[in-house]
Image (cartoon, helix red, strand yellow):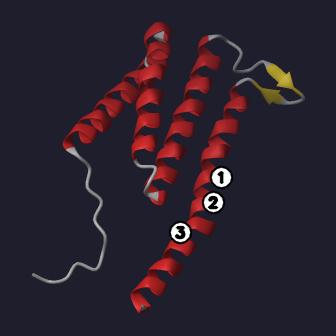
Amino acid sequence: MPEQTESVYYIPARFRRMENMHIVFWLLKDISWCLFWKELGIAMILPTLTIAIMISWRTRHIASELAHNLAVAFWISANSFWMISEFLGFDVAIIWRDITGKQLSLIPFFIGVLILVNYYLFQRPREIREKRTTTLL
């Protein structure tokens, strides 16, 4: 058998089932948003976001997985706030200067982007350098 040079990331079946349920909840949330089913849409925020946070926690020991899963959790937060702003009618209300209620969802969107920028600009290059150094030894 050839020597494996690339690391492998395994997902236990129970975690995979949870991730699959996460997708179901996320789809129900977004379908409810599209159809303006306020109660179901708002109810789906909690399980969708909870599972996103649990996935982030379970992958915390793998920097790339943690960064991407945290970005997803912030994306869901931003998306949920945007949905609520439309459901409650403050999406077009001016909150401050020219910023509307919907645009406040940019805060968690940008946090997610910053997490990924941090990973790709700083953490990933450090991982590559450490791997090269380890390989050379």
Q: Residue at x 37, y 22 (%)?
A: 28
Q: Please tell me whether residue 15 is drawn above or below residue 30 in the rendered image.
A: below
The residue beneath circle 1 is: 114
Q: Residues within 10 Å of mark 3 (few under 14, many from 20)?
A: some
* Circles 1 and 2 in contact, beta carbons < 8 Å: yes
* Looking at the image, residue 57 lies above or below residue 24: below
Residue kind at label 2, given as amino acid type:
Asn
Secondary element under disc 2, as helix, strand or loop, is helix
Find numbered disc 3 in the image and state the secondary structure of the residue it sits on.
helix
Residue placed under numbered mark 3 in the picture: 124
Q: Residue at x 39, y 44 (%)?
A: 58
Q: CA distance from mark 1 to mark 2?
A: 6 Å
Alpha-carbon span between mark 3 and mark 2: 9 Å
| Residue ID for mark 2 | 118
Task: Indicate the quadrant containing the N terminus: top left, top right, bottom left or bottom right.
Answer: bottom left
Q: Residue furthest left?
A: 1
Q: Earlier in the sequence, mark 3 or mark 2?
A: 2
- Residue 107: image quadrant is top right
User: How many numbered dots are placed on residues in this image?
Assistant: 3
Amino acid type of the residue that numbered disc 3 sits on in the rendered structure: Arg
Q: Nearer the viewer, residue 132 or 117?
A: 132
